Image (cartoon, rainbow, N blue to C red):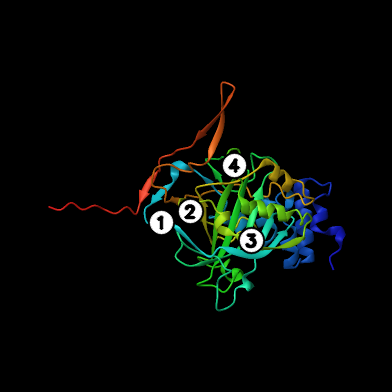
Amino acid sequence: MICSKYSPHNLLSHPFSRSSSMIVLILILNRLKLIKSDWDSWWTYEGISGPDFWGRLNPKWSHCSKGQRQSPIDIDTDLLIYDSILRPIEIKGDQIDGRLINTGRSIDFEIDLSSSSSSSDQRRVLITGGPLSYQYTITNLTVHFGRKNDRGSEHTINQKQFAGELQLYGYNSQLYTDWSDAKRSPNGLVAIAILIKISRNHSNNDQLSRLIESFKNTRNRGDSQSMYSLSLRKLLPITRQFVTYEGSLTQPACFETVQWIILNKPIYLSSNQLEQLRSFQSKLWDNYRPIQATNFRTIRTNIVNHRLLENYRFKYQLDGREILTDVYHKHYCVVNQPIAYRST
């Protein structure tokens, strides 16, 4: 058994400097040869167990520090590439059952896939279309949010961060048997990101409100509660437009097997609802990974009207007045356009 005196959690509060603490932590972890479950439990979003060190202390997480297709990224709207062959995203299925879990780092909803019999997929949600060449089964949802309303999302738009981000994850159920098999494999995973905004003149998302209301009963790390008939269709905003790129998981082991799809409309929560999340004993706020380098990756979109994220409004100051403005950007490039041939 590992002596609690030298556990990674205790080292985080040791009065050493950050660099000294890291050296001690590396030596102790190497000496004790921590088992996999210990690695999975101690990473955080700050300090020497935070994102800067994910890939340094565990060789199995090397992608976190050495990967070239890491997530999240900033979406620079001037560099988007319009791709005319991107299809709309298709969703088969709707209502799901599962468990809402306080992981100590985030709010997770794990879908109960066993509720689907071998002869029926009525309780599964399947994703196809968009940039996807295969069928993906949605397995879990995660909510990221900040301590303040001006931060919380993992992805940013033109370096603008939002109050939160809802992420839906799925695995390639045509090529792989389950999530564990798919997460390490090519074309293994899909992640759908929906940015969260503070509601002013918009109604709150009913299904997201259900999640938050149920989460009141899971205030401590490790608590969970069953939820039934959550509607994914009502959880998602109504839009056929999106941005997509090839990236990674945003937590260890940062496998680069994820096709990211960022929807062009947000969903809404009230300030009071976010304050409810921040009041839990497990401090879940600021549970977002810093922006990663794009490294010349292609970021495609199917938005055809030369307007991006038309439902996201930004504030700026002009002569002491607060101004709200929509952001419109022309696309940098167009690909896969049909060629018109002129008859002679």
Q: What residue would you read off at disc 3?
A: 253
Q: Earlier in the sequence, mark 1 or mark 3?
A: 1
Query: Do the CB atoms of the residues marked 1 and 2 lie less than 8 Å apart?
Result: yes
Q: Secondary structure at mark 3?
A: loop
Q: For residue 284, say whether it is visible.
A: yes
Which mark lies nearer to you, 1 or 2? 1
Whether residue 105 can be seen here: no
Foreground tag (3 vs 4): 4
Question: Dot 4 corresponds to which residue?
Answer: 161
Residue drawn at point x = 79 percent, y = 60 percent:
28
Say which element carries label 2.
Answer: strand
At x 53%, y 51%, the residue is 237
Q: Residue at x 59, y 22 (%)?
A: 320
Q: Which label's residue is closer to the chain start, 3 or 2?
A: 2
- Residue on which disc 2 sits: 244
- Counting residues from the start of the chain, the first of labels 1 and 2 encountered is 1
**Relative to 46, does residue 40 appear above or below in the rendering?**
below
Residue 40, position as x, y percentages in the image: 71, 62
How busy is the neighbourhood of tag 2: few (under 14 within 10 Å), some, or many (20 plus)? many
Which residue is most to the bottom? 119
Q: Secondary structure at mark 1?
A: loop
Spatial separation of the CA atoms under disc 3 and disc 2 = 21 Å
| Residue that carries the numbered disc 1 in the rendered image | 86
Task: Give me the C-alpha separation between circle 1 and circle 3.
Answer: 29 Å
Counting from the top left corner in percent of width and height, residue 181 is at: 58, 71
Q: Do the residues bearing badges 3 and 4 touch, measured as CB atoms within 8 Å?
A: no
CA distance for labels 4 and 2: 18 Å
